[in-house]
Image: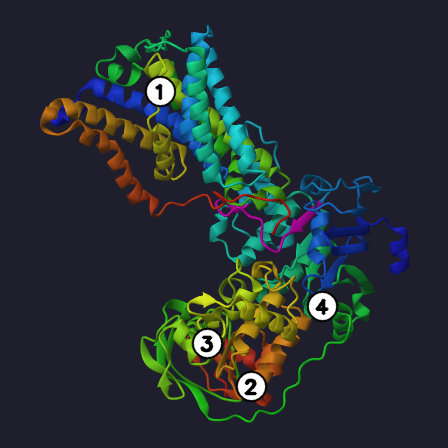
């Protein structure tokens, strides 16, 4: 296989691409060849330069050095004009961005046809386009209602529209940036089936990912990027999880270990709590959270987790029943909840976790701004705030230009570290962590887990809400399942496995023996 | 019921359409800009530019249609300025638009005063005359109500169809609607966000200028200071009322024209019992009410007011 490839002409060849943003080298001397029928995974941590490289390929950025060659229809390599998406499209490169580039006010068909006809064409029949798309859909299995407005399409359907956009333009090279970030496991599986089919039809495919499982199962070749450098180009068949993790991070990652818990008394009690409306409604929920214990709450998103988080954050009130902390009712507003010792690590950290326009330092103290440590006579104590920020940046290894950098500009992992530093350093009694490692790379995930275990060891009661079963099985002492607003009785983690949890998440009772 | 008699009078309908004509131009222009994602508050000033430049071209010897072309060209020029400031430079669309309005108004007055330093009564031109359409203009009632209009009114009505056709039936219109919703989608399909937006602003501004030109070359035959009198701002409100659709834009402009024509006649009927300023308020109050009812569920172009910088995530 490999010897033959040496003689074949690649579909796409990136040669010695270097891209700098100021002092930061996003891509350093990266070369890669993509052949017809091949699926390449581009693996790397957040900020490793994967997306930058693909944006150069698609013409959103211009490389400082190096060039891109694409196979022409005659089979020879031709240089791609840098810096214009138009040239990239014309040469057969299709890109599915992580954040979909669809106009929501238009139909799926209009989105696909956008830019494919000369703008000033006076008469325009969509009939031929429709026929071509029907054929493409039948061939690739990418079924979409072409007449539906995009705003009414589900996430998975929007992604299919994005892929059809590329196929409609006869793309021979398909690039997908983190294609599974927004998909359910079932949708991801379907996507990779489609990609295999497309590759079998002769397309060359590159997908960007930081999830090792999908890289190992879906790619032919893995390219690992680290800090902007290409550190490995390997056949997937010879790779395993540990090897890839080490390559990605550059050193082996210590997965945090957890000693057996020594749970104390129940700290937080839900007594017959009903709250919320619609799919997210909780009905008559009873459960308790013990100090010195991490309780995992597994479940498919939208089964009441949102309402539970809001209740514990003081953003919503129960319609009946009561939430008690140490026997006293939980405060009815967010500030009171914080004062009672609840640390909140919200699901959407960019939106709810930080104030993006404010500095790292301000975000670190924002929950304690009234305390005499940070304000006096109604005025902020800048010196103290800065001192605190410098300490936290050090202790939590928050990578940022400095305490006065705007929080919005940080990567997801570093934003999560700000949230952790802000909430956990207040020595909370209860920690609510919603999807704490979603979208984070291996290193940042390990750090989050380490901090949560440390909080438990200090005696806090920790509730982890997550869809990631691996995460729950790794760090939780016991796990309950939330399904349609009902929470099952927690079971010790040792007695559970993924399969069993998966069935419980789909609504099967915990104690029922598995069929077959 | 003499109030209702007003509605039965053909001259009322004729006036309503005449009053609506500059608004039709203006609201279509604002609609094109906003569909591409850019608010153009330069509209009030661009009306003045259109009114002054079209009239002056004719006064200096150009033909009437020549004047119309000059007005459109001058409008497009100010649109280009607004486009450069708000699209590649990404400045605040509000600030730039208001700046254009002040600058364009002042520049028009300055040009007028420089050309005519000491006239007291504004010089007149030979303006557009109502067209005499065979058969139609001779119909009883309908003929006077609907068909005794100048060529520019018919141009405005034609423009409604033209804008609707371009927006909904051509690849260009598809691209304009897309760039106002998600410019990243347009760039990802290989089109130029800057080109589309600046082009749309220029075309929209040219239409706005025609609204001004109608006033000096068709409704009246001279240029006065202050003659635009907020018509541009009304168009900004009418676009929302119209939910960014050309057909509804026409309806909104006609409604406003009808309110205005009605209040003029109502003043005569009721006479001195109510101060005339109350009647002047009527169309504006009614448009605010209409706006409150409609705008609450208005579906703004999603990228309206948001500058786009390629490559930025």
**Chain at numbered mark 1:** B
Real-space Cα distance between discs 3 and 4? 29 Å
Up the image or down, A455 lies above or below A83; here it is: below
Assess whether mark 3 and mark 1 are in contact (beta carbons under 8 angstroms). no
Which range of residues does the magenta coloring cover? A93-108
Pointers 1 and 4 within a single chain = no
Task: Give the percent coordinates (x, y) of residue B103.
Answer: 46, 28
Q: CA distance from mark 1 to mark 3?
A: 70 Å
Q: Earlier in the sequence, mark 3 or mark 4?
A: 4
Task: Count neighbours of disc 3 (C-alpha within 10 A) and say few if under 14, some if 14 to 19, many if 20 or more.
Answer: many
Q: Which mark is residue A217?
A: 4
Q: Residue at x 57, y 74 (%)?
A: A421
Res. A483 mark: 3
Specify the subunit that label 2 lies on.
A
Can you tell which mark lies on residue B225?
1
Q: Is residue B65 visible?
A: no
* The label number, if any, that marks residue A310 in the structure image: none
Label placed on residue A456 = 2
Camera-side residue: B225 or A99?
A: B225
Q: Secondary structure at mark 3?
A: strand
Decide: few, some or many residues near mark 2? Use Cα within 10 Å; few <14, some 14-19, many ≥20: many
Q: Do the residues indicated by labels 1 and 2 lie within the same chain of the protein?
A: no
Residue at 58% over, 74% down: A468
Residue at 36% across / 68% down in the picture? A277
Asked whether the residues under the numbered discs 1 and 4 touch, taking CB atoms below 8 Å apart as contact, a structural biologist would say no
Identify the chain of the residue marked 3, using the numbered disc in the image: A
Front residue (pair A424, A94): A424
Task: Check if mark 3 and mark 2 are on a common chain.
Answer: yes
Closest to the observer, B184 or B43: B43
Measure the alpha-carbon separation of dots 1 and 4.
74 Å
């Amino acid at each position: 296989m490999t010897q033959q490839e040496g003689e074949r002409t690649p579909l796409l060849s990136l040669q010695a691409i270097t891209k700098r943003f100021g002092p930061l080298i996003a891509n350093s001397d990266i070369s890669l060849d993509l052949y017809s029928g091949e699926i390449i995974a581009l693996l790397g941590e957040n900020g490793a330069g994967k997306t930058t490289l693909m944006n150069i390929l698609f013409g959103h950025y211009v490389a400082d050095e190096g060039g891109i060659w694409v196979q022409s229809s005659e089979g020879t390599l031709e240089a791609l004009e840098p810096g214009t998406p138009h040239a990239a499209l014309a040469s057969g490169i299709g890109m599915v961005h992580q954040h979909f580039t669809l106009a929501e006010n238009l139909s799926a068909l209009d989105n696909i046809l956008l830019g494919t006809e000369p703008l000033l064409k006076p008469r325009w029949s969509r009939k031929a386009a429709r026929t071509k798309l029907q054929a493409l859909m039948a061939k690739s299995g990418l079924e979409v209602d072409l007449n539906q407005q995009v705003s009414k399409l589900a996430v998975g359907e929007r992604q299919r529209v994005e892929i059809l956009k590329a196929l409609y333009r006869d793309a021979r090279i398909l690039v997908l940036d983190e294609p599974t970030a927004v998909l359910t496991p079932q949708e991801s599986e379907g996507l990779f089936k489609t990609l295999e089919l497309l590759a079998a039809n002769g397309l060359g495919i590159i997908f960007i990912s930081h999830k090792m499982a999908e890289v190992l199962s879906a790619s032919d070749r893995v390219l690992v990027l680290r800090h902007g450098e290409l550190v490995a180009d390997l056949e997937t068949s010879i790779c395993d999880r540990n090897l890839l993790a080490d390559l990605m991070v550059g050193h082996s990652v210590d997965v945090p270990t957890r000693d057996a818990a020594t749970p104390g008394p129940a700290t937080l009690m839900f007594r017959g709590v009903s709250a919320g409306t619609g799919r997210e409604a909780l009905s008559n929920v009873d459960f308790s959270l013990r100090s010195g214990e991490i309780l995992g709450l597994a479940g498919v998103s939208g089964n009441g987790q949102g309402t539970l988080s809001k209740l514990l954050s003081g953003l919503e009130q129960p319609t009946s029943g009561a939430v008690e902390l140490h026997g006293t009712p939980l405060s009815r507003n967010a500030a009171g909840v914080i004062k009672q010792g609840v640390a909140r690590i919200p699901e959407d950290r960019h939106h709810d976790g930080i104030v993006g326009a404010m500095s790292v330092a301000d975000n670190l103290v924002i929950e304690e701004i009234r305390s005499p440590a940070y304000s006096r006579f109604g005025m902020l104590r800048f010196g103290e705030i800065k001192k605190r920020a410098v300490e936290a940046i050090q202790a939590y290894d928050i990578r940022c230009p400095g305490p006065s950098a705007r929080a919005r500009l940080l990567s997801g992992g570093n934003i999560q570290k700000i949230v952790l530093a802000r909430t956990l350093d207040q020595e909370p009694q209860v920690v609510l962590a919603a999807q704490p490692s979603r979208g984070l790379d291996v290193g940042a995930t390990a750090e989050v887990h380490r901090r949560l275990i440390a909080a438990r060891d200090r005696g806090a009661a920790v509730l982890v809400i997550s869809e990631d079963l691996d995460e729950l099985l790794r760090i939780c002492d016991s796990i309950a399942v939330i399904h349609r607003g009902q929470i099952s009785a927690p079971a010790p983690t040792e007695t559970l496995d993924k399969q069993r949890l998966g069935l419980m998440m789909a609504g099967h009772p915990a104690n029922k023996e598995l069929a077959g | 019921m003499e109030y209702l008699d007003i509605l039965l009078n053909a001259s009322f309908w004729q006036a309503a359409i005449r009053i609506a004509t500059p608004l039709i131009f203006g609201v279509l222009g604002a609609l094109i800009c906003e569909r591409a994602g850019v608010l153009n508050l330069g509209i009030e000033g661009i009306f003045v530019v259109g009114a002054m430049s079209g009239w002056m071209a004719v006064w200096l010897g150009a033909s009437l249609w020549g004047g119309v072309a000059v007005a459109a060209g001058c409008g497009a020029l100010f649109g280009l300025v607004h486009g450069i400031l708000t699209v590649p430079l990404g400045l605040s669309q509000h600030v730039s638009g208001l700046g254009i309005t002040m600058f364009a108004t002042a520049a028009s007055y300055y040009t007028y005063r420089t050309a005519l330093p000491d006239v007291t009564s504004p010089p007149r031109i030979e303006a557009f005359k109502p067209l005499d359409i065979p058969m139609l203009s001779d119909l009883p009632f309908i003929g006077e109500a609907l068909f005794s209009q100048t060529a520019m009114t018919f141009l405005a009505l034609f423009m409604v169809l033209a804008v609707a056709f371009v927006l909904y039936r051509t690849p260009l219109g598809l691209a304009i609607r897309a760039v106002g919703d998600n410019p990243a989608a347009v760039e990802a399909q290989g089109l130029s966000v800057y080109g589309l937006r600046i082009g749309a602003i220029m075309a929209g501004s040219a239409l706005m200028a025609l609204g001004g030109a109608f006033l000096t070359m068709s409704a009246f035959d001279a240029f006065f200071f202050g003659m635009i009198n907020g018509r541009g701002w009304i168009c900004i409100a009418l676009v929302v009322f119209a939910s960014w659709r050309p057909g509804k834009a026409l309806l909104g402009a006609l409604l406003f024209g009808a309110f205005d024509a009605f209040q003029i006649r109502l003043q005569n009927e009721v006479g001195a019992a109510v101060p005339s300023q109350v009647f002047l308020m009527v169309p504006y109050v009614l448009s605010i009410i209409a706006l409150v009812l409609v705008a609450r569920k208005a579906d703004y172009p999603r990228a309206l007011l948001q500058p786009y910088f390629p490559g930025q995530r």
